[in-house]
Image: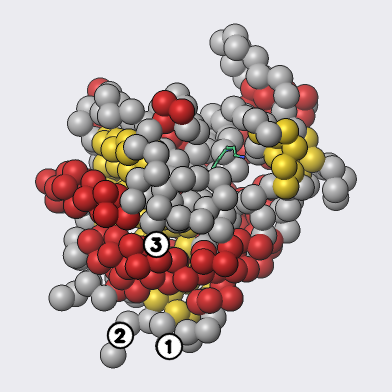
Amino acid sequence: MKPIIPVYFHDDQLLFHPPYEWDKRGYVPHPESPERPKAILKVLNQFPDEFKVSSPETQPEDLAHQVHVSHLLRLYNIAETLEEDAFFFPTFFPKNHQTNVDPENLNNTGFYCFDTSTPLGKHTYTSALWSAATATKAAQCVLSKESKLSYALTRPPGHHADKNYFGGYCYLNNAAIAASLLSEHGSVAIVDIDYHHGDGIQSIFYYDCRVLTTSVHADPTNRFPYFSGFASEIGLGAGEGFNLNVPLPYETTGESFLNALTTIIIPKVNTFNPDFLIIAAGFDTYKDDPLCDFKLETDDYTKIGNVLGQLDLPTVVVQEGGYFLPALGDNVKALLCGIRDKQNK
Ligand code: Q9C
Ligand code: ZN
């Protein structure tokens, strides 16, 4: 009998619905929509013998404060005073070294944000806090040994959100919040398999040797987030040697992706010998993803899951990117079942 995989999601994660983003092509419909978690749940709910969906009951404001500065969270509070359909898009990004910029003034949003793809709205903070709550719940689930594997259907995603600022569709760093909780009970390895470098996760733990951060992603030279994700970034101070980046060429196939995972990431994780594993799981590496150009197929997520499942660690899967809705649910299911099938063997 296969163990049931706990899945966490809260309906108020659907409240936030940014209308568009401003990118190189101009205004485009926002790809990070509430339709994403709906597409995932639609598939997972078809398999009640394999997945059990439940909701978190409390918002992890204390944990959010452990990972993010209070001014950033205050700014999200202020955005709650916006009208229902009003969104604040920062367009001015100061380059000076001012600190304590007034977060009570939404015109200062650019100080706390790095791109024009990540607007603030009335429901941003509510949805982001419930999103982080699912990651917290999923972490508590493996901590209590209720299950060896759990899945947080985090949306909005989190891996680009840093301690002091947000961007890349991310507001609260859900994986970092889960890691912050778990690291009080043991060492934590994070493996980020999203197409984009997990710059927020890297930055938050850059000086930390209790949390090993690894990311396999598209070469940032000509891809978001552009300014980080290179192999030369290995951590600093006590954290030196505890960050690993594996940038891959554009149009990377499943075979090459798996090769990078098994020959570079897995040996590093094995050497670190963590107590817990967090997978920042983006599916924008899929062949039909509208934003990205990797060539992974659904079966590749099963294989990635198998490789990560063989680590046989208490594992929290945290949802990140993935924008091709017709295959998103199948890909999530493939990864989760791939992990489950190799654990406890
Ligand atoms: N219109 C995540 O996958 N914008 N974030 C690039 C595309 C930023 C992706 C322009 C992409 C951020 C969680
Ligand atoms: Zn991504």
In the rendered structure, which amino acid carries the disc numbered 1?
Asp
Residue bearing mark 3 = 297
Residues under numbered marks 1 and 2 in contact, where contact means CB atoms less than 8 Å apart: yes
Badge 3, how many Cα within 10 Å: few under 14, some, many 20+?
A: some
Q: Amino acid at mark 2?
A: Lys
Label 1 sits on a secondary structure element that is loop
Please tell me whether residue 233 is drawn above or below residue 288 in the rendered image: above
x and y percent of residue 195 in the render? 43, 45
Q: How many marks?
A: 3
The answer to whether the residues at label 3 and label 1 have Cβ atoms under 8 Å apart is no
Name the N-terminal-most of marks 3 and 1.
Answer: 1
Marks 3/2: CA distance? 24 Å
User: Where residue 94 appears, x then y in whole percent?
Assistant: 65, 14
Q: Which residue is mark 2?
A: 2
Residue 49: image tag: 1
| Residue drawn at point x = 50 percent, y = 33 percent | 224
Q: From the viewer's perspective, is residue 93 above or below residue 248? A: above
- Residue farthest to the bottom? 1
Q: Residues within 10 Å of mark 1 (few under 14, many from 20)?
A: few
Q: Amino acid at mark 3?
A: Glu
Tell me which label, 1 or 2, sits earlier in the chain: 2
Tell me if 230 is positioned left or right of 268 in this view. right
Q: Would residue 296 be found to the left or right of residue 54 on screen?
A: left
